Image (cartoon, helix red, strand yellow):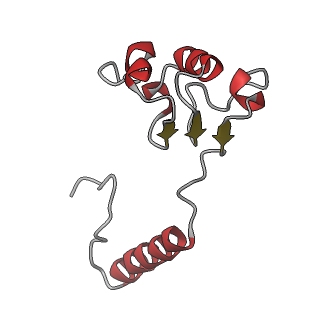
Amino acid sequence: NKKTRHLINAERLALMKNTAYLVNMARGPIVDEVALIDALRRGIIAGAGLDVFEQEPIAPDNPLLTMDNVLLTPHSLCWTDECFDHMAREGLGCIVDFAQGKRPQSVVSPSPD
C-alpha cells in the first residue's frame, strides 16, 4: 500500500538507538531494504529479524542473507503450535456448521443469496 511502503526508511532508522533491532513480521515493503542494509553495515542499528521481505521470495544475492547481524525466517513465524490448534478448531467449526446447514462463521467470500 502506498501509505506504508518504505514506512521504515533511512530517516526513521537513523532515529533508532545503535543497540536496537528492527523486527518485521508484517509486510516486507514496509521496510526500505536498501536503507536497512546500509544502516546495518554502518552500525546505525545493531541488527534485524525479518520474516517478510520487500521481494518474495528473497533474491539469492540479497546482502541480508550473508549479514551476521540479521536473522531471517522464510515467512513462517506464524506457524506455531497455537496457530495450528486455532486453525484446526476454526476449520472444524466451519465444517460442522456447513454440515448442519448453517453458514460458517469464517466465510471469506460468501456467494450471493
Tell me where residue 94 appears, x and y as whole percent: 38, 74
Q: Residue at x 40, y 73 (%)?
A: 90
Q: Residue at x 57, y 36 (%)?
A: 48
Of the pair 113 and 39, the residue shown nearer to us: 39
Q: Is residue 91 left or right of residue 53?
A: left
Q: Residue at x 48, y 36 (%)?
A: 20
In this rendering, the answer to whether 56 lies above or below 11 is below
Tell me where residue 83 appears, x and y as whole percent: 50, 68
- The quarter of the picture where residue 92 lies is bottom left
Quarter of the image that includes the N terminus: top left
Q: Is residue 4 left or right of residue 84?
A: left
Of the pair 40 and 101, the residue shown nearer to us: 40
- The quarter of the picture where residue 30 lies is top left
Of the pair 1 and 104, the residue shown nearer to us: 1
> Disc count in the image?
0
Of the pair 46 and 98, the residue shown nearer to us: 46
Tell me where residue 50 appears, x and y as whole percent: 57, 39
Q: Which residue is situated farthest in the left direction here?
A: 113
Tell me where residue 62 appears, x and y as whole percent: 72, 22
In this rendering, the answer to whether 103 lies above or below 65 is below
In this rendering, the answer to whether 112 lies above or below 39 is below
- The quarter of the picture where residue 3 lies is top left
Q: Residue at x 69, y 27 (%)?
A: 64
Q: Is residue 63 left or right of residue 107?
A: right
Quarter of the image that includes the C terminus: bottom left
